[in-house]
Image (spheres, helix red, strand yellow):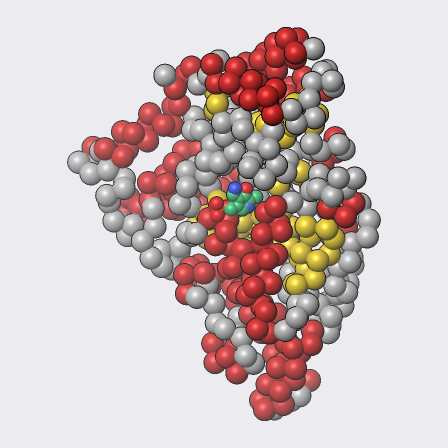
Amino acid sequence: SREEIAYFGAGPSGLDNQIAVAASQAFLNYENSGLGLAEISHRSPEATKILADTKAALTQILEIPDNYEIILSHGGGSGQFSAIVFNMVAMWVEKRRRKAMEELDGDEGRVLERVMKEVRTQLRLDYILTGSWSLKASQEAAKLVEPLGKDIVNIVVDARKTSNKGKFDNIPEEGWNLTPNENYGNDESAFVYYCDNETVDGVEFPKFPPQLETKSDKERLIVADMSSNFLSRRVDVSKYAAIFGGAQKNIGITDITFVIIRKDILTTQPSNSFLHAVGIWSPPTILHYPTLSASSSLYNTMPIFSIWISLQITLLLLTTHHLSSPPLLGQEHLSHKKSSLVYTTLSAHPSIYNINVPHPACRSRMNICFRIKGGDEGAEKAFLKGAEERGLLGLKGHRSVGGVRVSCYNAVGVGKVERLCGWLGEFAEKEG
Ligand code: PMP
């Protein structure tokens, strides 16, 4: 039964049992309407209320400031790898256009000429590489901007170069080669991108990267992928231009992607004709943030059932930690407690378990990756087989990394983590 299973899969994650039971009812017959949530119109009053309640709950739990908008969309985190590039490059072009209009007294011909040249010579997208997902995002960006010129994607730092093993297993403290930023001056990058928690490699930024803190007269537009640690700790949303994530790990099931975006990005967008004139594609409508926002995330048919599940999870987090202030502090403590239990157990048996990320400060609280006896396949197989027999599932490491990965998302309770630690201890005793 569901209660006997402890599921540590990396995504999708398990669901809280109470929510899964309520969801099965809502799927069949939502609030006695005779229709299930996957059947009702996304434009019905019920759907409108679910959307509004979800945005309100997210605003409350993340303390999202008024100058931000929540967009619910499709396409997962991967869709956002492209959406971010389309929308942020367009914003960069618009800022350049406005500046040129001012400086060239509105002479449209010269404005066009100048911006066209700037696109070819000055457009930069800054990517910080700390794992497979930021790498993938940077590759998508490079593919999209390739027709505009070479070297537009600037790799700020690549953590493989500061690893003893040439792997994504650390966060470099120094050597960040950010594009100079003169606050709307000529060298501004369109955005700086990083992945807050690298799901495959088990590397997580312990806090907002100090290297990206805004200096007094400069502004950087920071974009963060929070697909795998969303709602697991406090976040100062005001530091970001955009935060995005797929729902299927910490806040729901597949199909929903959250984008929290600063409103000025929605209003600093050029006309399609100007974009085309300077040689840039206009964003596909389904990825165009201003369109999605103007339609209150109902540009096309939204999976209301999935949104409802995200709402239930957010409400459950709010009620579980109703005494904690700020609202995510309770979940932050819990996430820390769960990962500490696992890391402490692993560290107690150093001859059996080798944690992939050497430095404790950048070990992920969400995805704990380790090898057994230096990657002994037989021992790893035996560990996973024993785990399965005990109802501990979803522990196999990502195919590119191997070994074991324990994903402690929000739906994984402390009790389940303790059960896993029991098996970790038992296995180490047997093998030791
Ligand atoms: N970013 C991160 C950090 C992820 O973990 C994942 C999926 N595992 C993605 C992006 C891609 O998300 P999706 O599968 O929703 O496209």
Q: In this view, does 266 lie above or below 53?
A: below
Say which quadrant the C terminus sits in.
top right
Which residue is rendered at x = 23% and y = 33% of the image? 28
Q: Taking 24 as reference, is 291 left or right?
A: right
**Residue that protrudes farthest toward the right in the picture:** 174
User: Residue 164, percent across and down?
Assistant: 79, 39
Which residue is rendered at x = 38% and y = 36% of the image? 309
Q: Which of 154 and 384 is in front in this view?
A: 384
Q: In which quarter of the image is residue 90?
A: bottom right
Q: Taking 164 as reference, is 41 left or right?
A: left
User: Residue 176, percent across and down?
Assistant: 78, 54
Q: Please give the count of numbered marks on the rendered protein.
A: 0
Q: Quadrant of residue 103?
A: bottom right
User: Residue 275, percent across and down?
Assistant: 52, 77
Which residue is rendered at x = 33% and y = 57% of the image? 300
Q: Taking 369 as reference, is 395 left or right?
A: left
Say which quadrant the N terminus sits in.
top left
User: Residue 209, percent across and down?
Assistant: 73, 46
Q: Quadrant of residue 296?
A: bottom left
Q: In this view, does 139 lie above or below 21?
A: below
Residue 70 in view: no
Q: Which of 73 and 333 is in front in this view?
A: 73
Q: In this view, does 81 lie above or below 233?
A: below
Q: Which of 50 and 356 is in front in this view?
A: 356
Which residue is rendered at x = 65% and y = 45% of the image? 131
Q: Which of 25 and 238 is in front in this view?
A: 25
Residue 73 in view: yes
Q: Taking 191 as reference, is 252 left or right?
A: left
